[in-house]
Image: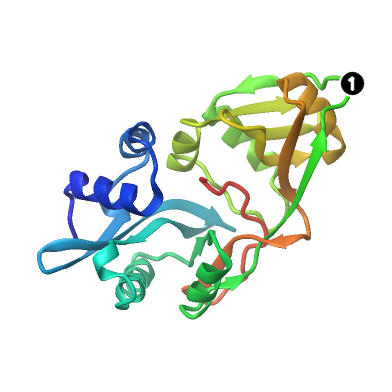
Amino acid sequence: MTTDTASLRALWKEAFGDTDALLDHFFAAAYSPSRCRTLEKDGRLAAALYWFDCSFQGEKLAYLYAIATAKPYRNQGMCHRLMEEVHSLLSAQGYAGSILVPASAALSCLYARMGYGHRCTLRRWRCAAGNIPVPLRKLSPEEYALCRRKRLPPGGVLQEGENLAYLSGFADFYAGENCLLAVSRETAAIFELLGDPSQAPGILRTLGFPAGDFRAPGDGAPFAMYRPLCPGEAPRYFGLALD
């Protein structure tokens, strides 16, 4: 395992193309060497991943994030080897399962071969702003965490701590009388809407967006994939993909 953040940043940028500003925020708000695992080959960083701690029904889950293999080492089984090592480590540390959000159908197939299955779905939709605004008040990440506990649907995964600290770098949190939401600062994307989905048009009017894309609990498109590490019920809602 490497703790050389310069190498980690270089691999991340090669794999995902993210900005230095986002990486600065991740390594300041969410990174911990204890939640990062790497593989090296020929003395070079070959693959890396990170995870965020979350929980389901009182058990620890690991949200695996930014899984990347350096270009010279792709298609050599490095990702599979890294994932196997991480699964063993997580089991030893008492995690009940691991969860991830694949970015493509091809990655879904890859992770399926590693024991992951689609267990969490989302309702996704796009709508235009309405004429009547919905009153909203801005929340801190800590306030959002407390409100989210009350609105999370059955089978939902708790995401707090470093999850929300990282998300707060590119999203804002709001509450209304019958809704709770996390909103991208860059685009008209509502990462999560908990509560009354019929308020979506009024929410957009309040936020000043002519139209927007929403994600909310519900039966819809497959979203997060889950791999159990011990017997138990699988989660059904995982809402805050840190994309």
Q: Which quadrant would residue 70 be assigned to in this image?
A: bottom left
x and y percent of residue 145 in the render?
A: 58, 36
What crowding class fits label 1: few (fewer than 14 Cα within 10 Å), some (14-19), or many (20 or more)? few
Q: Where is residue 87 in the image (x, y as percent from the top left)?
A: 38, 71
Looking at the image, residue 179 sits to the left or right of residue 225; the answer is right
Is 86 displayed left or right of 178 in the figure?
Answer: left
* Residue positioned 59% across, 73% down in the render: 117
- The amino acid on which the numbered mark 1 sits, given as a three-letter code, is Asn
How many numbered circles does the render carry? 1
Q: In which quarter of the image is the N terminus?
A: bottom left
| Closer to the camera in the image, 145 or 237 | 237
Residue 146 placement (x, y as % from top left): 60, 34
Q: Examine the image and state in which quarter residue 222 appears.
A: bottom right
The answer to whether 79 appears left or right of 120 in the picture is left
Q: In this view, does 236 lie above or below 109?
A: above
Measured as percent of width and height from the top left, residue 239 is found at 63, 49
Write down the residue under mark 1: 131
